[in-house]
């Protein structure tokens, strides 16, 4: 007896695609495109007026993590199933043979135990849909775009960090600008005061030097006059002495 047609609506219907991410890129090679977990979503919708039990199975259970992998979908609702591909060493020459199967069955009205329903289910009551796994590699333009995007993101991050630093500095200066201006004014006033004091000291020194020069000038002139007067007296005395001696010599010669 043929199995009934699947009542659940699957999206996607036939393939689960996992797109690798470029972690290290080189013009001639791609290194480890699946080093991180890659997640794709499988949507299950129940268009009927009854509860539908479902299970998600795979041919490679160690490669995938499925959440949730079973449950009950209420009438007219849907559920998103996350299928997570675990990291592995990708070989581009190896074609993926992994497959998934979504099993479902209409829940009985008096259902209390989901596991019991699956155990008691007859093969003709089970509905299933199969999906194959596809590993997508980023295209060349996507690689270049991703590299450029990473560079742009890095530049934007640096710019944002520098902008934040500048903003923090500006906010700090705004809080301190008045104190800094007041300190500058105080320092300018202090410098001006010191300059005036220095100028006054120089003027006082010059005045004292002029006074001392003026006061010493009369003494010098008096000394000169005394010296000149003394010299004149000596000259006159010598002249008189020579005149007297000349007179005496003249008389003796007569």
Image (cartoon, grey):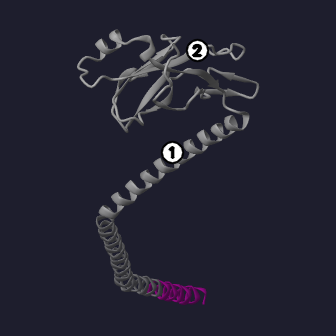
Say which quarter of the image contains residue 107.
top left
Q: Nearer the viewer, residue 5 or 168?
A: 5
Please state if 96 lies on the left or on the right of 191 as rendered: right
Question: Label 2 neighbourhood size at 10 Å, few (<14), some (14-19), many (20+)?
Answer: some
Q: Percent position (x, y) of residue 191?
A: 35, 69
Q: Which residue is mark 1?
A: 157
Please state if 254 lies on the left or on the right of 170 as rendered: right
Residue at 47% across, 87% down: 232
**Quadrant location of the C terminus?**
bottom right
Q: Nearer the viewer, residue 158 or 224?
A: 158
Say which quarter of the image contains residue 182.
bottom left
Q: Nearer the viewer, residue 167 or 149?
A: 149
Query: What is the secondary structure assignment of the residue under circle 2?
Result: loop
Asked whether residue 94 is in view, the answer is: yes
Distance (Cα) linking label 1 and label 2: 40 Å
Please state if 76 lies on the left or on the right of 133 as rendered: left
Asked whether residue 87 is in view, the answer is: no
Disc assigned to residue 98: 2
Residue at 41% across, 86% down: 221
Q: What is the magenta range?
A: 233-254
Residue at 40% across, 11% down: 122
| Magenta-colored segment: predominant secondary structure | helix
Q: Percent position (x, y) of residue 208?
A: 33, 78
């Amino acid at each position: 007896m043929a199995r009934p047609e699947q009542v659940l609506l699957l999206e996607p219907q036939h393939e689960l695609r996992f797109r690798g991410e470029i972690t290290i890129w080189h013009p001639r090679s791609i290194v480890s495109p699946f080093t991180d977990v890659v997640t794709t979503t499988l949507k299950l919708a129940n268009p009927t007026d009854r509860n539908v039990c479902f299970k998600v199975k795979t041919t490679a259970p160690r490669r995938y993590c499925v959440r949730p992998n079973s449950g009950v979908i209420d009438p007219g609702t849907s559920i998103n199933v996350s299928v997570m591909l675990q990291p592995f060493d990708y070989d581009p020459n190896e074609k993926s043979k992994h497959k998934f199967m979504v099993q479902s069955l209409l829940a009985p009205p008096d259902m209390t135990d989901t596991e019991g329903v699956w155990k008691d289910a007859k093969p003709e009551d089970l509905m299933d849909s199969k999906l194959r796994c596809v590993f997508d590699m980023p295209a060349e333009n996507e690689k270049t775009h991703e590299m450029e995007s990473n560079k742009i993101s890095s530049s934007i991050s640096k710019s944002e960090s520098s902008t934040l630093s500048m903003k923090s500095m500006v906010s700090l200066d705004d809080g301190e600008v008045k104190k800094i201006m007041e300190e500058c004014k105080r320092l300018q006033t202090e410098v001006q005061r010191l300059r005036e004091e220095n100028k006054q000291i120089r003027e006082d020194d010059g005045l004292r030097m002029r006074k001392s020069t003026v006061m010493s000038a009369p003494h010098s002139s008096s000394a000169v006059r005394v010296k000149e007067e003394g010299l004149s007296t000596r000259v006159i005395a010598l002249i008189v002495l020579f005149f007297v001696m000349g007179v005496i010599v003249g008389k003796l010669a007569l």
